[in-house]
Image (spheres, rainbow, N blue to C red):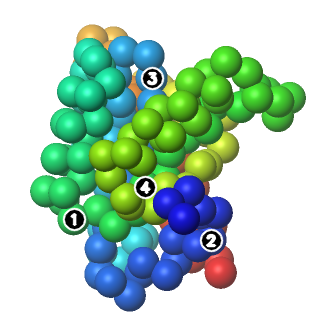
Amino acid sequence: MPIVDVTELASLRDARVCLAGLDLGTKTIGVALSDLSWAFGQPRSVIRRTKFTADATALKALLDDTQAGGIVIGLPLNMDGTEGPRVQSTRAFVRNYLKFDDRQIAFWDERLSTVAATRAMISMDVSRAKRAERVDAAAAAFILQGALDRLASL
C-alpha cells in the first residue's frame, strides 16, 4: 500500500536510500532530501507548478535521480486540526501521483512549517527575494526533519 504511516517508512532504512520531503504549494512544490543515514533533511529544489502531468513527471524524475525511497508530504491541517480545502487538494495530488510512482508516501502535519522556514531565513539575513524563491524547499526540509526525528525515536 503506497500511502503509509510515517513509522512504516522505517523499513526503507536498510535499503540505503534517502527520503524526500515535499511542501505542496499552489504555485510550487518544495523538495527536500535526507542524507543516507536519515539524520538531516536539506532543502533541494523547487518545482514550478504548471499542469499536473508535467509536475508529476518532473517530481518523479528528480526522485529517481536522487534515489529517494519514500516520500513525506506535508499535510496542511487547519490550526484546530481539522481538514480544509488544502488538505483535500493535497490528498488528491497524492492519489493522482500514485499513478506515476509507486514509492511509499506518508503524510506529516505541516502546520507552521512555512512560518518556521521563513523565520529561520530571516534570522540568517536572507533577502526577501531569495526567501520567496527558497521558502517552499526550506519548508519541505522542516517537514522532512520532523519525520526523520520521529523515525529516529523509534
Residue situated furthest front in the rendering? 99
Q: Position of residue 55 (x, y in %)?
A: 27, 29
Q: CA distance from mark 4 to mark 1?
A: 11 Å
Q: Nearer the viewer, residue 29 or 150?
A: 29
Q: Quadrant of the C terminus?
A: bottom right
Report the amino acid beneath label 1: Gln
Q: Position of residue 36 (x, y in %)?
A: 30, 74
At mark 1, the secondary structure is loop
Q: CA distance from mark 2 to mark 1?
A: 20 Å
Report the amino acid beneath label 2: Thr
Q: Which residue is mark 1?
A: 67
The residue lying at 28 percent from left, 18 percent from top is 51
Q: CA distance from mark 2 to mark 3?
A: 25 Å
Q: Residues within 10 Å of mark 2 (few under 14, many from 20)?
A: some
Q: Tell me the tag on residue 25.
A: 3
Q: Nearer the viewer, residue 80 or 56?
A: 56
Q: CA distance from mark 3 to mark 1?
A: 23 Å
Q: CA distance from mark 3 to mark 4?
A: 16 Å
Direction from residue 27 to residue 57 in the image, left or right: left
Q: Position of residue 45 (x, y in %)?
A: 24, 37
Residue 37 position (above or below residue 90): below
Q: Residues within 10 Å of mark 1 (few under 14, many from 20)?
A: some
- Among the two numbered marks 2 and 1 on one chain, the one whose residue lies closer to the N terminus: 2
Q: Tell me the tag on residue 71.
A: 4
Q: Tell me the tag on residue 7.
A: 2
Q: Nearer the viewer, residue 141 or 70?
A: 70
- Among the two numbered marks 2 and 3 on one chain, the one whose residue lies closer to the N terminus: 2
At mark 3, the secondary structure is loop
